Amino acid sequence: MIEVIPLKAFTDNYIWALVSKKSVYVVDPGDPNPVLSFLKENDLNLKGILITHHHFDHTGGIKTLVDKFNIPVFGPSGSKIEGISNELKENDSIRIFEQTFKIFEVPGHTLDHIAYYSEDSQKLLFCGDTLFSGGCGRLFEGTPLQMYESLAKLKNLSPDTLVYCTHEYTESNLNFAVVVNNKNEFLKNYHSEVQSKRKNDEITLPSSIGKELKINPFLRLNDENIISNASNFSSSILTEEVDTLKAVREWKDNF
């Protein structure tokens, strides 16, 4: 059994620590210090690093941790990330403790973005900045079509898959979602739950694929309410889901 523990970094990042007995892998350690503190306080051994994409708030701790522990670093193939020792591409797999993780290439936020998915005894998804709870990543390098295809891979996973994204963006995402999907009563109720949690500085993650299918406008692009509101925003008639994603993403970027 893998225990997944959030380590807070910067203002809203989570470094996910995968713990089994006295061993740990970490996902996207942008800052080495929360990892070092966690290891010391719990007398744990760091065994490796998993990287989803090249942005510094996900990679900034690699050098310090590798220099100290001489550990493997898994990350996207062909990326410009310094320190990657094991390059991964679509359909590759790696073994983390008793779980096998399959690799998805999920470009959109960046071109090198990958996600790690296990469907063994625990269904776990580490998706970096591709899928957020209630949203998706900004399109810094990729196209709307790339993001649409990437999210399509993730939305088809088992509904009970736990979703571990890297940022505490849930409340801000849902502030927007309740506008673009204003007839979604489940979303409105969940938005209130999240607001209460965040007032108490409680974490809103992990989410699940099943929950995201109910609340996340970027996974609900066939919803007539979303299509209508996005069409009004873009002053155009939207007939294709990828065009709806493009309009909703542009709306969110300026919300």
Image (spheres, rainbow, N blue to C red):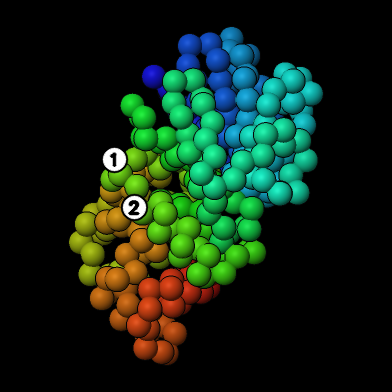
Q: CA distance from mark 1 to mark 2?
A: 11 Å
Q: Which label sits on residue 156? A: 2
Classify mark 1: helix, strand or loop.
loop
Q: Is residue 61 visible?
A: no
Residue furthest to the front in view is 91
Q: Residues within 10 Å of mark 1 (few under 14, many from 20)?
A: some
Q: Secondary structure at mark 2?
A: loop
Q: Residue at x 54, y 47 (%)?
A: 90
Measuring 61% from the left and 41% from the top, which residue is drawn there? 88
User: Where residue 32 is drawn, which disc sits there?
Assistant: none
- 239 is higher (above) or lower (below) than 170: below
Task: Say which residue appears at 39% left-offset and 19% top-offset.
Answer: 1
Q: Is residue 67 above or below residue 153?
A: above
Decide if residue 171 is on the left or right side of residue 60: left
Mark yes or no: residue 181 visible.
yes
Q: In the picture shown, does residue 56 fall above or below 42?
A: below
Read off the residue under disc 1: 160
The residue nearer to you, when weighing 202 against 131, is 131
In the displayed image of the protein, which residue is found farthest to the left?
185
Q: Horizontally, is 195 left or right of 94 in the view?
A: left
Q: Amino acid at mark 2?
A: Asn
Q: Residue 125: image x %, image y %?
A: 43, 40
Of residue 247 and residue 107, the one placed in the foreground of this image is 107
